[in-house]
Image: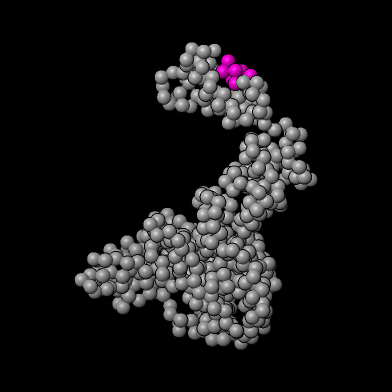
Amino acid sequence: MEIRPIIGLEIHVQLATRTKLFCGCVLEFGAAPNTRVCPVCMGLPGALPVMNRSAYEFALRAGAALHCRIPAASKWDRKSYYYPDMPKNYQISQYDQPIASDGYFEIPAADPAAPGLKRIGIIRAHLEEDAGKNLHEGLDHTRVDLNRAGTPLLEIVTRPDIADAEEAYNFCVELQRLVRHLGISEANMQQGQMRFEPNVNVAIIVDGVEHRTPISEIKNLNSFRSVRSAIDYEIRRQIDAWDADHGYTLENKGKQNYGWNDRLEVTEFQRGKEESHDYRYFPDPDLVPVAIDGQRTKRLESQIGELPVIRRRRFGLDYGMTEKDGDVILADRATGDLYDGAVAAGAEPRSLAKQFVGVWNHLASASGKSVGQLGILPSTAAELATLVADGKISAGGAARVAEAVLAEPSNAGNLLQLAERLGVVQVRDTAAMQAWVDDAFASNPRAVADALGDNPRKAKAAPGFLRGQVMKISQGKADPNAVGELIEAKIESLRSGGG
């Protein structure tokens, strides 16, 4: 029996506009229920929608980055269905003329034997408004909050080109990086700004005959982990269901909606899935079709820049950047641009990466920013990295210099002079360092005994401890590499009977 999962994704991305898609209500997460509403998003009679231009331009930018075909014109449609959180009883969406279609998105290939990029087809990307939110907790009735109603969403629909749960996970991670890179969404999943709906079924081939299980759409997943876990579970569930009943096929059961129970880590049947004709799509009479200006599209394309997946691969090849460092440095476009600029300004790439991760990222996280949002210049980052690489200041000294630069930007004029004022310039006077080493040995006889003893683990750890004591005594001024050499020399001298 041969098993082949068939996986596609539908992703809803909340666009980072100031207001809703068809009205002037401000988008604000966590606002008091029903305080960010108006007659338009509440669906009151006589209220007419007006298109949000920023949302449309964000969608065009995404379509271009996804290598989609952008049509000369696009239109709005009404998708009819009733839920309490959809006050108009229809959703304004796009049906047969989406803003973008027939594209692809490249992600790192999962097979280590064949490194490179795998292309996942994009069927379409279209704009639509979000529904409100039903609240069920704590009462015997449902409450409805319409603050989200009318929020601009970009729905991206892939082809079923995804091979397994891990590949789906990687796709979602890379797509989040892309929309943040484009500046079209914050993609904060805790705030519902990016939601995933995998479509999963399995081709089971027995004696040359292929059987396909029903397609399950798993609704509203809001974390990368749940995407991976839900797909993994659903594949196993469908195989078991077909094994128990060979009539469990797409032809017999059709498409179905499932929910994901994160506590039990199982999918749960919700209902049969509607087809397009069930929604009774028709053109929205209150919104005119939109002609898409080719010049505007070209201008938006020029703003895209190097895509994150391409930049990550280049940083690995050209700069030897690790995956772990890349997660910090490529977290957003501004940080990647700063790193590129600092390398161009003369910084050694590996030393610079260590400083981005160990110094700048620590300071950025404390202020709720990324490194690229700190406002430092590439030349400043390059100079600080060079001072450490040249042994003029230690990593700890670099942290103090960086803090001083952020506290007073004028300090960035000459970092070596700033380091001298802060007293963190490393001392390379061998006599002074030898005196600090001798002091550390005299103050820590147990560590010295461990270094000279027969316990391999203690003997290995002792020199590092002693070096830390020297750095403490010297207040970070000693050159740690030179100190290490002096410590090893003194240990050898003691071991051989010297002083």
Residue 337: name its quadrant.
bottom right
In the rendered image, is residue 445 in sight? yes
**In front of the other: 323 or 262:** 323
Extreme residue in the left direction: 207
Q: x%, y% of residue 48?
A: 67, 81
User: What residue is shown at x 74% (from left), y 34% (from top)?
Assistant: 420
Its colouring scheme is one colour
User: What residue is shown at x 43% (from left), y 26% (from top)?
Assistant: 457
Seen in the image, is 138 located left or right of residue 342?
A: left
Does the magenta portion include 437? yes
Q: Dominant secondary structure of the magenta stretch?
A: helix
Q: x%, y% of residue 22?
A: 65, 76
Q: Quadrant of the C terminus?
A: top right
Seen in the image, is 451 located left or right of residue 265?
A: right
In the rendered image, is residue 396 in sight? no
Q: x%, y% of residue 488?
A: 52, 24
The vertical placement of 18 against 287, above or below, is above
Residue 233: name its quadrant.
bottom left
The vertical placement of 167 against 380, above or below, is below
The vertical placement of 296 against 469, above or below, is below
User: What residue is shown at x 64% (from left), y 38% (from top)?
Assistant: 390
User: What residue is shown at x 65% (from left), y 21% (from top)?
Assistant: 431
**In front of the other: 137 or 419:** 419
Residue 413: name its quadrant.
top right
Q: Quadrant of the N terminus?
A: bottom left
Q: x%, y% of residue 18?
A: 68, 67
Seen in the image, is 391 located left or right of residue 462?
A: right
Does the magenta portion include 427? no
Extreme residue in the right direction: 410
Number of residue marks: 0
**In front of the other: 157 or 243:** 157
Q: Which residues are magenta?
A: 435-442
